[in-house]
Image (cartoon, rainbow, N blue to C red):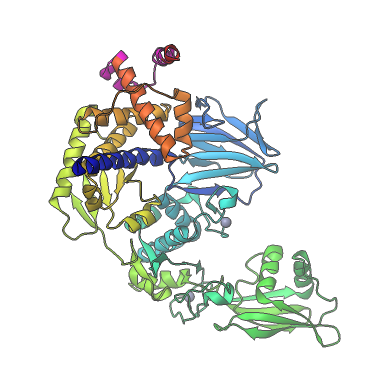
Amino acid sequence: MTSVVSKSRSALFTCLLLLLTCARINAQAPDIRVRIYSLQSVKQLTLSSLENISWKTCVTCRARSLATPLTVQANGNQLQYGNSKPSKLYLTGKYRIQIAGEHALESRYPLEVSAKDNVLVLILSMPMEDYVAAVLAGESGNFQSEEALKAMAVVARTYAARFRGRHKAENFDFCDTTHCQDLHLSAVTDRQRAAAEATEGELLWFQGSPAATYYHQNCGGTTAAASEVWPDVKANYLQVHTDPYCVRSEHARWESRISKADLQSALLKAGVQIPTGWQSLQVESHSRSGRVQLLNIIGRDGKLAMRLSASTLRFAAGRALGWNQIKSDFYELRISGDEVLFSGRGSGHGVGLCQEGADGMGKLGKNYHEILAFYFPGTVLGISAQGVDWHLLHSEQLDLLTTGANPSPELLNAAESALHKAQTVSGLQLTSHPLLKIYPTLAIYRDSTGEPGWVAANTRGNTIRLQPWELLQQKGVLESTLRHEFLHMLVEGNTHVSLPLWFREGLVLYLAQDLGKETTRRPISPTLSPQQMEAALRNPQSQQQMQQVYASARVTVASLVARWGKAEVMQWLGRSIPAGALASLSAAQAAQH
Ligand SMILES: [Zn+2]
Ligand SMILES: [Zn+2]
């Protein structure tokens, strides 16, 4: 009796794990949502199709193709094209965005367009490693050393893991400016992509959490402690230390002359009114690293008129006169007639990694581990807080990445057999060599993929990311999870972009069941219409709802197979579902009601 109970429990768990895996693949939750053109106040854009573009104005709406370019405007909080005023636009496929005064941008990341206060909001969903490569293009375009580029890839990724969702209230994770991390989507080079790939998933950890990996252009020879810039950031690894590697580079020293009148008007624009006829500007105090903290403004009468923080002065001058005027708070100053002469060091806030120093270290032959250890002392590099290394196991049919030095041959056998079964039952062939990445612990899997613990695996492109296999084996779901993920890979690799999600999901579940190893379920009639299933898959609400949707999708595909034959239904993958087949479905549904 006991064994029956535990068996049925484990079967239920299987089903939950599997079903929810699907939900997450479609929701693409781990992707980073980035707002592009955040600073440009875009009022109008033109979208044109480069390849298989499909667009719609609501999640449940029918996807359309794009024959001629579509020009969209912001109208209050609505979008407008022709006479239509939808609130959103969803786009997939490869497309070009044209905005007046900007270079055209080509992209294949899913795009969401909406409007707020007459400005268009464009949000891309990017896989983490693509995001990292685009940050390298934006922030480290002039790096010469490959190792420094790898160090920056880890820093950019860790920053993203640590601060993800900082624009959550606006419905995206990061903007594309230096407020978050600067992106340069159209300038990503193979070198930058290679640096992201070479360090895939690696983060810098401190006491079990991703570190706050700030960075700047040049520290001028001494880094700043985080607390100097952000008093509430407590991080032992962001301390003052000397940096011998950046002092000979371009931004190590700078000079600047700014007229008193320009400084006064720059401050006024920033809302700071200083007394007219002021005589002098003096440094009142320095931070621990030697950067200017407070400044005194001496009035006409030779007495202290007001006090100003160095950052207020730098931001005011930056916005009004350009950011190359006062590049850092690391300076000495003197008054000469009507001008203030600044003699400074470094560029940026000075906290964390010094980019020119990192490049200098790389050119001296230091590797990225050494570079990161120098700028973030006390942190641990790795895919987990323990700093684990990946090992690659290559076989004819697939590649396996694990953290164990001696991965079990059992695992490779299980993977190869699951792939073989998935190919046999579907009659489909893989379009690329799959990579199975198996995480050593549930916590690391969650941190690296962004998936909650109840999602057994996540598949994107040719990579399947899997929970610790021992864990899946204990639950008795290793084989079924692998088969399921391979079926997804096969189906997605052979699917026409316009095919609805419910069909893709339903087909995978149907084929998985066809393998005969799944729990046989009592036949049920589809409870949801294709439109209802599609809407739910686009926007999953609850575990319970997903179970219903998947059961319904599987049964719907099963009834299509019963009516048209499996060979015919498999053919639709590369084309579309014939209208007649869908009509037969709704007739059958109508008959039931
Ligand atoms: Zn931001
Ligand atoms: Zn430096």
Q: Nearer the viewer, residue 526 or 490?
A: 526
Q: In which quarter of the image is residue 517?
A: top left
| Residue 544 pos. (x, y %) | 42, 37
Residue 224 lies in the magenta-colored region: no
Q: In which quarter of the image is residue 478?
A: top left
> Which region shows up in magenta?
563-588
- Left-right relation of 225 to 438: right
Q: In the rendered image, which quarter contains the N terminus?
A: top left
Q: Is residue 89 above or below residue 458?
A: above
- Left-right relation of 42 to 456: right
- Left-right relation of 26 to 441: right
Residue 586 lies in the magenta-colored region: yes
Q: Which of 176 and 213 is in front in this view?
A: 213
Using the rendered image of the protein, determine whether residue 304 is visible from the camera's viewpoint: yes
Q: In this view, does 343 lie above or below 111?
A: below
Q: Nearer the viewer, residue 527 or 124?
A: 527
| Residue 204 pos. (x, y %) | 39, 66
Q: Is residue 297 above or below residue 402?
A: below
Using the rendered image of the protein, determine whether residue 253 is visible from the camera's viewpoint: no
Q: In the rendered image, which quarter contains the C terminus?
A: top left
